[in-house]
Image (tube, rainbow, N blue to C red):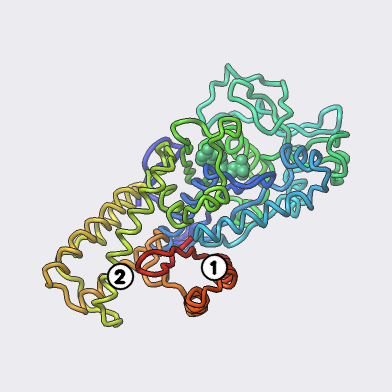
Amino acid sequence: MRIFNSASRSLEVLEPSEGNRVGMYTCGPTVYDFAHIGNLRTFLFEDLLRRYLVFCGYDVTQVMNLTDVDDKTIRAAREAGKSLDEYTRVYKDAFFEDLQALNVRPADAYPCATAHIPQMVEMIARLVEKGFGYVAEDGSVYFSIEKDAGYGRLVNLDRDQMRRGERVEHDEYEKEGVADFALWKAWKEEDGDVAWDSPWGRGRPGWHIECSAMSMAYLGESFDLHTGGVDNRFPHHEDEIAQSEGATGKPFVRYWMHSNFLLVENKKMSKSAGNFYTLRDLLGRGHSARAIRYALLNAHYRQLLNFTIAGLDQAAASLDRLDTFNKRLEGLASGGSGGELPKFCNDVRSEFVAAMDDDLNLPGAIAAIFRLATAGNRAMDEDVLDANGADAILGLLRELDEVLGFLRCEADAPDRAVQALMEQREVARGAKDWAEADRLRDEIESMGWTVKDTSDGAQLHRK
Ligand code: AMP
Ligand code: ZN
């Protein structure tokens, strides 16, 4: 498999350092608000990457952190008049709900920054000891970019443009503002009761050290793969490399992968422009999580993705086409494990794999599936597909859905409990007991399905 390594700015063959084991660290959400669909695009890219690595036989350990203490979370909690823990808990829970709705497979660990302060303090102490870190007058600790000859390696910074010896206090800053950055921030009035003890006095970690310390705590001092959105490249990942390699003297990460931004209606998503969506906003407007998963994945991860409501409707229509194909196959299938694939789909798996091996070319992989649907429908129209063939195609779709997570196949059928509620609702409607019918509809909806009443009777759709 070839992937684009942001560190070398080139396509490279993925070769894990230890056999088939891949350690993968993915920068997680800053839990100061609900994740927006741009964030979710990045998390879906990471889900796809990890699923595909597993599909290829790699033994993946994925760690995703939750940034539950930083400039943004502290400010937001203070403005809401809540403790940091009370405030961030709501968004942590919401984040896991979003991942589940989008059929994202869980990572192996979700470390929270607030639970790993000792590891951060230990790493900062090592950096001070080695001369990379220094303590400022107020008790904050800074990383000296002057001391790190390689600083700027990830994003190709010009050393002459760096403000060496100057400091930047905030976690986020522009390339033009590159300067010594904070490892530890001395307590200030606006931090309220958010503070931990350290050898340099009370304070809190800088954002970047959080990911250096948590990734190394779970994956070791050197590991294979680190991912995030493009905006994480600088300063976050640049600073992570500087800190981690400064502390250990070892290479930190072998492959860096970054997914591009999501635009909404061709514009940067912002609350003021009114084009800012969370998953909840879209579900509330009746869109299905499954179509949202498909729409957010259906572009190469290194391309900008322009999200539109029309595009989301198209995604839903494409899924309907695949569902119809699936249902036809199921109607024909015997339920067995199937024999050999019919000739016309011999190339589908290899086309899918070739596309995904090419730096995760998902649009190419999906095209292979639509070609299969076209050929399969034609074979059924012509009556040349038998039950064994249908079983085999369903088996192939199930296998590929381990990677895609939106084909769903039979797994998408409502379970017995949902079906029973539907039957009760039909009875209630027959008896014109609308209140009971509505109550049952709500119950069905809470189980992840929407009910559409059509002239052919009520239909269930995945939310
Ligand atoms: P944050 O919660 O701000 O720490 O961001 C979580 C993840 O979402 C990071 O990997 C960001 O790089 C990514 N991200 C932020 N905005 C966007 C966007 N508009 N499109 C795609 N990814 C984004
Ligand atoms: Zn991070």
Specify whether 392 is left or right of 455.
left
Q: Which residue is mark 1?
A: 441
Residue 326 appears left or right of 454: left
Residue at 73% across, 42% down:
73
Quadrant of the rendered image containing residue 92: bottom right
For image coordinates 71% across by 30% down, the residue present is: 170
The residue depicted at 20 percent of the width and 60 percent of the height is 347
Q: Amino acid at mark 1?
A: Arg
Left or right, 441 with reference to 51: right
- Under tag 1, what secondary structure? helix
Q: Indicate yes or no: mark 1 CB to ligand 1 under 8 Å.
A: no
The disc at residue 248 is none
The answer to whether any part of residue 251 appears in the image is no
Question: Where is residue 307 drawn, in percent x and y?
Answer: 44, 40
For mark 2, what is the residue? 327
Q: Is residue 88 above or below residue 173?
A: below
Q: Nearer the viewer, residue 343 or 424?
A: 424
